[in-house]
Amino acid sequence: MAFTPIRELGETPLAKPGTSFARVTEVVSRVTENPAPRGWWILFSIAATFTGVLGLTLAYLIWMGIGTWGNNSPVAWAWDITNFVWWIGIGHAGTLISAVLYLFRQYWRTAINRFAEAMTIFAVICALMFPTIHTGRPWHIYYPLPIPNAMNLWPNFKSPLLWDVFAVSTYFTVSLLFWYVGLIPDLATLRDRTTKRLRALGVLSLEGGAPRGLLQLRAAIYGGLALGWRSSHRHWQHYERAYLILAAISTPLVLSVHSVVSFDFATSVEPGWHTTIFPPYFVAGAVFSGFAMVMTLLLIARAVFGLHELVTLRHLDLMNQIMLTTGSIVGYAYAMEFFIAWYSGNPYERYCFINRAFGDYWWAYWSMITCNVLIPQTFWSKSLRTNLTWMFIASILINIGMWFERFVIIVTTLHRDYMVSAWGYFHPSIVDVLTYLGSFGLFFTLFLLFIRWLPMIAVAEVKMVLPEADPHYGHDHDEHHEPAHAKAALAEEA
Amino acid sequence: MSEHEHEPKAVEAAAGQDEEGRPTVKRPVLYLAEFETPAEIVHACEKVRDAGYRRWDAHTPFPVHGMDKAMGLPDSRLGWIVLAAGLTGCLTALGLIWWTNGVDYPLIIGGKPPLALPAAVPVMFELTILFSAFGSVLGMFGLNALPRHHHPVFYSAHFERATDDRFFISIEAADGKFDLDETRRLLESLSPCHLELIQEES
């Protein structure tokens, strides 16, 4: 069997030929070991400032009550639920990359999966915050949990809002487990590099002092989290099976989560919400916005930490192709919603869609169409798909468009449903705006801490797809099954 | 290509002292052979497997393709654990919904019967996934006997590269076939770039 490195779609190898295992370890681990570059500190101070703003707005909100937001009858769900759906959708790309692309043996995912999984976890944290504070009394958030209580009441399991509680909290837990399992071998790598440095320090100076203490703390933390991983193949066997199973169960999970989120709308009888297209349409939109967010973050991290060797233009090109695909699905869903509104013959449904495109919120609707339908169509062009500036701008525009999509769905339906006497117009308050901006602060703060302290690229997985990882690398024929040939080959090597 | 830097002196039962100055005897725990490439480790594992060892292991920075066969490992049983966990999750959800909404405090919502199965499906699905995920992670830890922070392979300074770019075989002294000379000869015949005997004070 002639040796062929792992290739994607019959094209170029995934890593530059000659990238060694040690080089991969070094490139990824040094980010957590060297002092942070100035770019990191600048971004971190901005993010931490916004997190502070979030803290202040949350304190004000809890002190004053939900009346500080613009939500009011008839628009009782507004920015908070928009933000919830938007953040949770962003998280979906992480699971898609880590689970679905794994099942499809898309090896290029190894360069970005760790990164995307971390994004999932932080996005879900931001998402969970919004319904929690929307309750108005977040200290009663345990009410939807089936806990025996003094009221002798149980939660209503026929409510899609309760399904949502189970779906999103399962999603968060499973994503965290998946992420941690993937991290274990890489945490062991960081542990071993730290003990190596400690020993070197011990030889050079018996004193050690502060750097020694910090290194010991570092070794204890990474060592503790690595659970004594010793790279055993007997372990790898169960580990790979666990990873495969997690990928296999995360795939239907990710589809179920945004489907259940869409049930919050679809099971109601509001015009524009009560449609069967919602589950697939929400899932496609979630993947679309999530990939755009991975792209934004990846382009920044790639530039700040110099990861060009491992995250190549080819990876970015493939991600843009996924955005083109999901963006087209979303565009199709928008068209289909309009068609069904007309075809159903329901006057409320028809009015709802005409009002979306040409009513008071026309600006939101057309921003959505521009960003979500027109912008990704530019990715048919290979030169735009591989243009860093354009893909950065497009990735941000797509996320703006996806925020508008949720805003359009929620607010345009609620502001004019059946009774003309109950129509209204929604105005966000400054607290709405600052809470949303603050959630970015929280997301980026967590993200920047992650890329500073944990291996942001899956070291073991990238090594696995290098040409050298193939046991046949450098051999012309498959000889290791016949003992006589194997002996000859070994003698030749020695 | 490989430079032999064996340390036969390690084979002699070395005498040491414990903290209170009492004499201690080191006993061999395992041999650790180091290799440079995936091809070498796969060939070497086939030899160790064919020599009939049972308590031995390969250590590689990433899962090397074809090692299951080279080591003669049976298929992982993890799937069965996950299946049991997933079924438990599904039945737990059904039981919970049946008891809370159907029996203990019957709720009639939207004209549906107290236990309406279609409305129970989303939560049954989510708990199946949740329990399966815990089953696969905790099951994997259980099968691998992790966490375990004190394995003798960590005594070797060379072993730090097992998470970087080197490949190792360890054969434990607890193996019935283990013999200080015999096992060393076998490992030497595999041309490792480094071979050492790990000892523990007893």
Image (spheres, coloured by chain):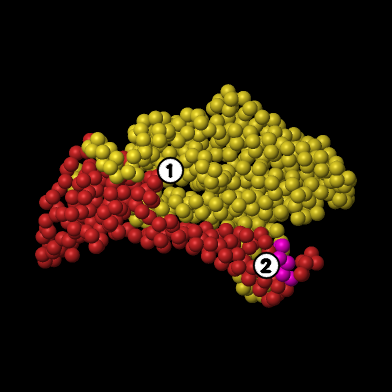
Q: What is the chain letter for disc 2?
A: A
Q: Mark 2 highlights which residue?
A: A155
Q: Amino acid at mark 2?
A: Pro
Determine whether, in the image, residue A60 is placed left or right of residue A356. left
Q: What is the chain letter for disc 1?
A: A
Q: Mark 1 highlights which residue?
A: A461
Q: Which chain is tinted yellow? A: A
Report whether residue A217 is seen: no
Does B115 appear in magenta?
A: yes
Determine whether, in the image, residue A12 is placed left or right of residue B90. left
Q: Nearer the viewer, residue B70 or A258?
A: B70
Residue at position x 62%, y 73% in the image:
A148
Toward the top, the furthest residue is A383
Residue at position x 30%, y 59% in the image:
B54
> Helix or strand or loop: what does disc 2 sit on?
loop
Residue at position x 62%, y 60% in the image:
B125
Residue A453 location in percent, x, y?
A: 41, 45
A263 w.r.t. A285: above or below: below
Q: Nearer the viewer, residue A58 or A258?
A: A258
A247 w.r.t. A142: above or below: above
Residue A284 location in percent, x, y?
A: 66, 43
Determine whether, in the image, residue B56 is placed left or right of residue B79. left
Between marks 2 and 1, how big is the CA–CA gap? Answer: 43 Å
Does A77 appear in magenta?
A: no
The answer to whether marks 2 and 1 sit on the same chain is yes
Residue A483 location in percent, x, y?
A: 29, 45
Tell me the quadrant of the picture where the C terminus of chain A can be found.
top left
Q: Amino acid at mark 1?
A: Glu
Extent of the magenta region: B114-119
